[in-house]
């Protein structure tokens, strides 16, 4: 008798365990479905926010190719709702700022502020940036074009051992001379500072003309009109490009 009761009790417990297991599986499946739904919604919001920011940057800089924008963070939806993004990477090509063309800008933006309402209606009025650090790539051809556009018939080119050479025609009072010099590129207040370190072919010039020639071959290529309000911190020329590191803080980018 006792044995029959024990078998009956065990059978009853097994019958009760089956519905409980089914309930647990249903809950797990619901949670997984909800997680997948949230993940998909977050991915869609990420793509939409990146596209909207890229469109805003394209409008503010006038680049022909849409900038590449990447929002960082495991989940973007909370950042969108707060209107505050921790880290954003931006890459742009072919930026024209007045007479100067910039080959490429790769920027890391931190503490980016975009109101949730603007994202919701897909109309960004302004983008606030707490801090920005960028790598700006310039070509010698674009730098030389800038010099010609601004009234300096000079050419910048790479020389041996990663040095840079400037050459062209320079007006010295009542005469025009062909000049060339090895120059140093450095961080200026508003851009890339060009300073001659070794001037060539000045044997026939008097001291005043030599002084004027050095002044004519000293100039700054301004970068203050680039996006993100950049301040030059380092300039590194190589055989094909001039790479400039810049940074800024408390910036506003308008469309």
Image (spheres, rainbow, N blue to C red):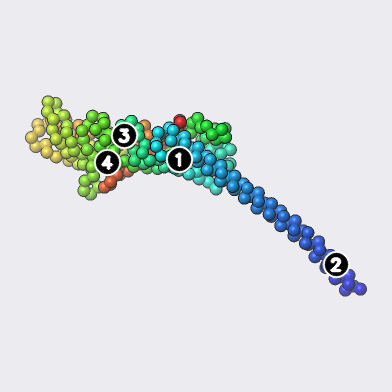
Q: Residue at x 13, y 30 (%)?
A: 176
Q: Residue at x 40, y 42 (%)?
A: 106
In this image, 229 relative to 31: left or right?
left
**Mark 1 neighbour density, 10 Å: few (under 14) some (14–19) many (20 or more):** many
Which residue bears the numbered disc 3? 100
Q: Position of residue 177 (x, y in %)?
A: 13, 33
Q: Residue at x 21, y 35 (%)?
A: 154
Give the Cα distance between marks 3 and 2.
88 Å
Q: Are marks 3 and 2 in contact (CB under 8 Å)?
A: no
Which residue bears the numbered disc 2? 9
In this image, 3 relative to 185: left or right?
right
Q: Is residue 235 visible?
A: no
Look at discs 3 and 2 and give the one toward the viewer. Answer: 3
Q: Name the element at disc 4.
A: helix
* Image quadrant assignment for residue 93: top left
Quadrant of image for the N terminus: bottom right
Which residue bears the numbered disc 1? 109
Give the Cα distance between marks 1 and 3.
23 Å
Which residue bears the numbered disc 4? 140
């Amino acid at each position: 008798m006792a044995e029959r009761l024990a078998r009956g009790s065990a059978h009853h417990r097994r019958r009760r365990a089956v519905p409980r297991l089914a309930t647990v599986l249903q809950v797990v499946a619901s949670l997984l479905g909800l997680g997948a739904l949230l993940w998909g919604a977050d991915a869609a919001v990420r793509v939409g926010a990146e596209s909207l920011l890229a469109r805003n940057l394209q409008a503010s800089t006038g680049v022909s190719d849409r900038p590449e924008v990447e929002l960082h963070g495991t989940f973007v939806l909370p950042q969108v709702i707060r209107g505050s993004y921790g880290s954003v990477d931006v890459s742009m090509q072919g930026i024209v700022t007045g007479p100067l063309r910039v080959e490429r800008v790769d920027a890391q933006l931190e503490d980016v502020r975009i109101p949730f309402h603007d994202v919701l209606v897909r109309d960004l009025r302004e983008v606030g940036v707490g801090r920005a650090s960028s790598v700006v790539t310039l070509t010698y051809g674009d730098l030389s074009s800038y010099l010609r556009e601004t009234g300096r018939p000079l050419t910048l080119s790479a020389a041996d051992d990663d040095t840079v050479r400037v050459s062209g025609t320079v007006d010295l009072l009542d005469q025009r001379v062909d000049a060339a010099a090895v120059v140093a590129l450095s961080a200026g207040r508003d851009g890339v500072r060009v300073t001659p370190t070794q001037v060539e072919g000045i044997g026939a010039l008097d001291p005043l003309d030599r002084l004027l020639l050095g002044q004519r071959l000293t100039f700054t290529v301004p970068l203050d009109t680039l996006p993100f309000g950049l301040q030059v911190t380092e300039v590194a020329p190589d055989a094909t490009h001039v790479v400039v590191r810049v940074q800024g803080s408390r910036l506003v980018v308008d469309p």
